[in-house]
Image (cartoon, rainbow, N blue to C red):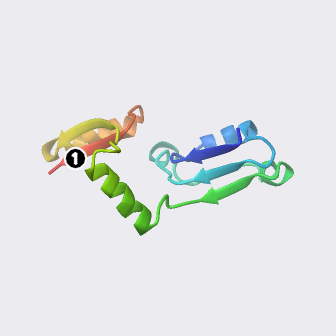
Amino acid sequence: MDAVADVAGGPWLEGLLPALRDGARRVIAGAVAGAVAGPVVTFDLRRLYLHNLSLIGSSMHTRAHFASLADLARAGTVRPRIAGSYGLTELHAAQEEFRRGTHVGKIIVIP
């Protein structure tokens, strides 16, 4: 692979490094896999320098980018994938779905 955008982190960081071609980039923009493995990971640094890989951290957006994305969402141009929607009284069920880690998309809690 030439580039990877990783919003999960966790143990896959080291596991997928060999799949990157020499000179590739990997952007880390989250650590949601930390719910199971924790946000602290280990990997062999030699993989980075021997293959000229770039590991980049990103908060995913600036305020201007977020405002632009919000405008697109309001216009209906971009729609997030919703994995589940829960009332506030179902918070435990929402947390359990998140903990299982099998969902795809956002888990919404409606107050």
Judged left or right of residue 7, residue 83 is: left
Q: Position of residue 68 (x, y in %)?
A: 38, 60
Q: Position of residue 43 (x, y in %)?
A: 71, 49
Q: In which quarter of the image is the N terminus?
A: top right
Q: Nearer the viewer, residue 35 or 25?
A: 25
Judged left or right of residue 60, residue 3 is: right
Q: Where is residue 79 in the image (x, y as percent from the top left)?
A: 32, 42
Looking at the rendering, which quadrant does residue 103 occupy?
A: top left
Q: Which of 35 and 47 is in front in this view?
A: 47
Q: Can you say whether 19 is above or below 67 in the image?
A: above
User: Given the image, on which type of amino acid does mark 1 rest?
Assistant: Val
Q: Where is residue 76 in the image (x, y as percent from the top left)?
A: 28, 45
Q: Nearer the viewer, residue 106 or 71?
A: 71
Q: In the image, what residue occupies the spot 44% across and 46% down?
A: 35
Q: In the image, what residue occupies the spot 26% across and 52% down?
A: 74
How packed is label 1: few (under 14 Cα within 10 Å), some, or many (20 or more)? Answer: some
Judged left or right of residue 23, residue 109 is: left
**Residue 41 visible in the shown view:** no
Q: In the image, what residue occupies the spot 73% across and 41% down?
A: 20
Secondary structure beneath dot 1 equals strand
Q: Mark 1 points at which residue?
A: 109
**Residue 47 visible in the shown view:** yes
Q: What count of labels does the image hold?
A: 1
Q: Which of 62 and 82 is in front in this view?
A: 62
The residue sitting at the top extreme is: 102
The residue sitting at the right extreme is: 50
Judged left or right of residue 89, residue 31 is: right
